[in-house]
Amino acid sequence: MTGWIAVAGLGPGDDALVTPEVATALDQATDVIGYIPYVARVAPRPGLTLHPSDNRVELDRAHHALDLAAAGRRVVIVSSGDPGVFAMASALFEAVEAAGAEPDIRILPGITAMLAAAARAGAPLGHDFCAINLSDNLKPFALVEHRLRHAARGDFAMAFYNPRSRSRPEGFARVLEILREECEPERLLIFARAVSTPDEALSVVTLAEARPDMADMRTVVLVGNAATRRVGRWVYTPRSAGRA
Ligand code: SAH
């Protein structure tokens, strides 16, 4: 039996947002590896071994997948959203680099949180935008501040992943401070929590109204550009927008 590894995105939560390609890979798998809540989204069945693991052990998971594939297993590593967005695909390639292995790998895209959130709100990412991971697990917070300031000056719309955690409550307050230095108080922000799950909640506020406690680790925060505006209950960014 020839082993393989698929790194699959499960989308933001709703099963209807899992691609058919990912569903097929899960049907063919002998092993599923990933963070506990993501593995919990995969239905158990005979012949399938689930390997849930704790947060922050991405490299261990990747090496485990390489070992299993070398032994002929068909391994799916699951991420939420898209596996290439602040998730397991890069971790797997780091492990491949370190191990010098050449396994059969496929990366199966998924719907990332910012796109699911943007769709709920309207079209806030309809012009140029960027995504910033606010977690300082793998980079100094000074780099977060630097990129954030430059993105704001470039008038990008932005999506913030991992905005706020219990271990880092002050980081997001600092992010709001920087935005207040760079952007006008009327700038629109969308706090999109647990999109496409039963806990989904969306709120649209101005930068003046935004408070740090509006975000938690299940929230993706979208920030409009200078031209982003409301139309009825929707928020959208015009296709030709912004200052030079
Ligand atoms: N690979 C994932 C992101 C992993 S980082 C993706 O592509 O979506 C985890 C962060 O993603 C969370 O802190 C949150 O900011 C965001 N996120 C993931 N699922 C979400 C959802 N259903 N609703 C809102 N934000 C979500």
Image (cartoon, rainbow, N blue to C red):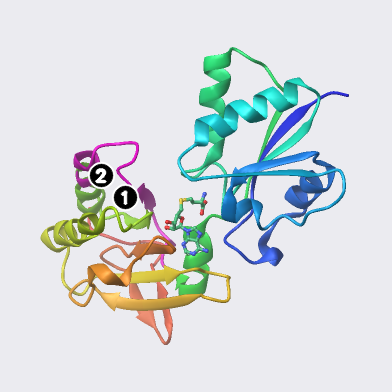
* Figure label count: 2
Q: Amino acid at mark 2?
A: Val
Residue 16 falls in image quadrant: bottom right
- Residue at point 31%, 72% (across, down): 214
Q: Is residue 127 located in the magenta-colored stretch of the structure?
A: yes
Where residue 226 sits: x, y (%)? Answer: 25, 65
Real-space Cα distance between discs 2 and 1? Answer: 6 Å
Q: Amino acid at mark 1?
A: Leu
Q: Which residue is mark 1?
A: 134
Where residue 21 sits: x, y (%)? Answer: 76, 48
Magenta highlight range: 124-145
Q: Which residue is mark 2?
A: 144
Q: Is residue 80 visible?
A: no
Where residue 43 sits: x, y (%)? Answer: 76, 57
Where residue 5 sits: x, y (%)? Answer: 71, 32
In the rendered image of this protein, does residue 136 appear above or below residue 234? above
Q: Is residue 76 located in the magenta-colored stretch of the structure?
A: no
Of labels 2 and 1, earlier in sequence is 1
